[in-house]
Amino acid sequence: MNPKLLEKNYSNETVYFISYAKLPDNMTAGLMHKIVGLGMVINYKTGVIEDISCTLMTTVAKQFLEDVFIGYNLYDKGINPLLDDIKFRFHGNSMKSLCVVAKENHKRFTEWKQKNNL
């Protein structure tokens, strides 16, 4: 197990959402897993994405996506600038799938906030 994972402590102000999307068949992960999952730890008071998990296979892709997502403030900017950043910076075959799951997580987070009057 990754020792870095053991260091994580999330506050009571964080929530976790995960969504899945189909991957293209022309990539290794698509052939093996068929889907990509993207989990986002979001601080519901600040709107900041504090952490992510992603089922992509390479360490570099995971680290790169952490750099893109972590620290992004959904309240200040909404989801569209993050999607634009993914499209501009991430040129893997799974780019469209990642945008789909990021958008779905944002939608589910927004619905959760409304349901809980936050």
Image (cartoon, rainbow, N blue to C red):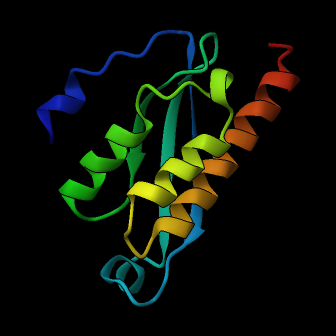
Q: Position of residue 51 (x, y in %)?
A: 40, 31
Total number of numbered discs in the rendering: 0
Look at 53% across and 21% down and name the residue there.
48
Observer-nearest of 92 and 51: 92
Look at 25% across and 46% down and name the residue there.
63
Q: Position of residue 4 (x, y in %)?
A: 17, 30
Is residue 59 shown left or right of residue 111?
Answer: left
Q: Quadrant of residue 92?
A: bottom left
Q: Position of residue 79 (x, y in %)?
A: 66, 40
Q: Position of residue 73 (x, y in %)?
A: 56, 24
Look at 20% across and 55% down and name the residue there.
60
Observer-nearest of 101 and 87: 87
Instruction: Assign the N terminus to one quadrant of the image.
Output: top left
Instruction: Assign the C terminus to one quadrant of the image.
Output: top right
Look at 70% across and 33% down and name the residue there.
109
Is residue 56 shown left or right of residue 113?
Answer: left
Identify the residue at the far front of this view.
88
Indicate whether 47 appears above or below 90. Answer: above
Indicate whether 44 appears above or below 93. Answer: above
Indicate whether 66 appears above or below 20. Answer: above
